[in-house]
């Protein structure tokens, strides 16, 4: 926990804030004409870059956790994606700080682009894997939301549809095909943040340079009045320069901060701690069933064994009552003494 308490304020100050003030608030990139309507570069490209660098420096999870990457609960993934989508309307629509036409366009483009991206990613899954997937649809939602963010209020709706088609296909290609090759396969990017945030954010910024309209740029008080479709092709180059600055700045400072922290505290848990789990390390459990029993893996009350059909969790509590796998018992202690009541547990 302490390592992140150290990392967050330093990264916010030295990395994130520099990118934010360079593109917003009259910063030097803004003055040169780079457009980032609501944080596609400031937030998503920076976080995607920092996440990938962090995953490389910190190191991978346990091999067994990398092999079994199934989500804990698909329904919760869907609920989270839905909440994220709803909240993004305020994220992009609130950027003009007014209930204006520009805010309305940003909200419309956000939903149109995200829906298009969802459908495109699902189509790619269907064509390549011969079946659609819920997690693929969620990735399509995320890439659509990320890609439209730098362009939301400065492109027409047809531009949002085009960005959605690209955000549902280009990150799909990098995640499902390039992600299995060097250098991506050697970095344990647990959630694929380099694809859903860095690639999608940079793609959205690039498309902003292509599809920004004169009306949108005027409403947002941009330095330049449009992108390539308004015969100002230089905007594409400006968007590329903006992305490269954010990527380079985050690579440098994320690396410096993590290596400095590594001199003070370890960046990665030991393999033993990883096998126990981060919740158990802090004496907590994500799910609690039955009466309260004070147990700790570190004290030896619980041990991990190879999971089987009868004992799917692969946990052993106390001493077994019988040779049958899964029948375990533990004493419910009060004030350090056994009450005599034994709780029989079948995992």
Image (spheres, rainbow, N blue to C red):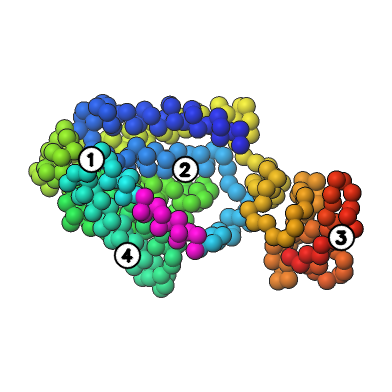
Q: Specify which label sits upstream in the sequence, 2 or 3.
A: 2
Mark linked to residue 98? 1
Above or below — where is 216 with respect to 265?
A: below
Q: Position of residue 342 (x, y in %)?
A: 85, 61
Label ID, residue 119:
4
Residue at 34% of width from left, 37% of height from top?
42
Callout 2: SS? helix
Question: Considering only order in the chain, which callout, 3 or 4, is on the residue closer to the N terminus?
Answer: 4
SS at mark 3?
strand
Q: Which residue is mark 3?
A: 341
Label 4 element class = helix
Q: Nearer the viewer, residue 31 or 128?
A: 31
Residue at horizontal 13 percent and vertical 38 percent from the top: 218
Badge 4: residue crowd in 10 Å (few <14, some 14–19, many ≥20) = some
As for residue 266 lying within the magenta part, the answer is no
Magenta part, dominant SS: helix
Left or right, 174 with reference to 113: right
Would residue 122 be found to the left or right of residue 99 on screen?
right
- Of 255 and 114, which appears nearest the observer? 114
| Residues at marks 2 and 1, CA–CA distance in whole angstroms | 35 Å
**Which residue is disc 2 drawn over?**
52
Q: Which residues are magenta?
A: 75-87
């Amino acid at each position: 926990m302490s390592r992140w308490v150290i990392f967050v304020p330093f990264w916010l100050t030295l990395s994130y804030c520099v990118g934010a003030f360079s593109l917003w608030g009259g910063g030097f990139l803004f003055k040169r004409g780079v457009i980032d309507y609501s944080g596609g570069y400031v937030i998503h490209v920076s976080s995607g870059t920092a996440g990938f660098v962090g995953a490389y420096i910190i190191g991978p999870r346990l091999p067994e956790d990398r092999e079994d990457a199934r989500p804990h609960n698909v329904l919760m993934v869907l609920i989270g994606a839905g909440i994220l989508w709803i909240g993004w309307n305020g994220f992009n629509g609130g950027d003009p700080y007014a209930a204006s036409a520009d805010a309305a366009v940003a909200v419309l483009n956000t939903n149109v682009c995200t829906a298009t991206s969802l459908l495109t990613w699902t189509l790619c899954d269907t064509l390549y894997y011969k079946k659609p997937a819920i997690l693929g649809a969620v990735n399509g939602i995320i890439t659509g939301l990320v890609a439209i963010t730098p362009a939301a209020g400065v492109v027409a709706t047809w531009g949002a549809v085009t960005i959605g088609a690209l955000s549902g296909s280009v990150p799909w290609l990098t995640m499902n095909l390039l992600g299995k090759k060097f250098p991506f396969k050697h970095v344990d990017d647990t959630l694929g943040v380099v694809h859903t945030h860095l690639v999608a954010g940079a793609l959205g910024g690039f498309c902003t340079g292509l599809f920004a309209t004169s009306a949108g740029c005027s409403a947002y008080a941009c330095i330049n009045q449009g992108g390539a479709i308004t015969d100002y092709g230089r905007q594409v180059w400006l968007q590329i320069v903006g992305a490269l600055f954010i990527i380079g700045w985050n690579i440098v400072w994320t690396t410096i901060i993590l290596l400095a922290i590594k001199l003070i505290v370890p960046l990665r848990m030991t393999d033993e701690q990883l096998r126990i789990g981060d919740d158990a390390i802090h004496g907590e459990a994500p799910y609690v069933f039955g009466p309260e029993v004070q147990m700790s893996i570190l004290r030896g009350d619980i041990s991990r064994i190879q999971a089987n059909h009868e004992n799917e969790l692969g946990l052993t509590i106390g001493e077994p009552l019988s040779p049958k796998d899964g029948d375990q018992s533990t004493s419910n202690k009060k004030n350090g003494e056994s009450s005599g009541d034994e709780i029989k547990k079948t995992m």
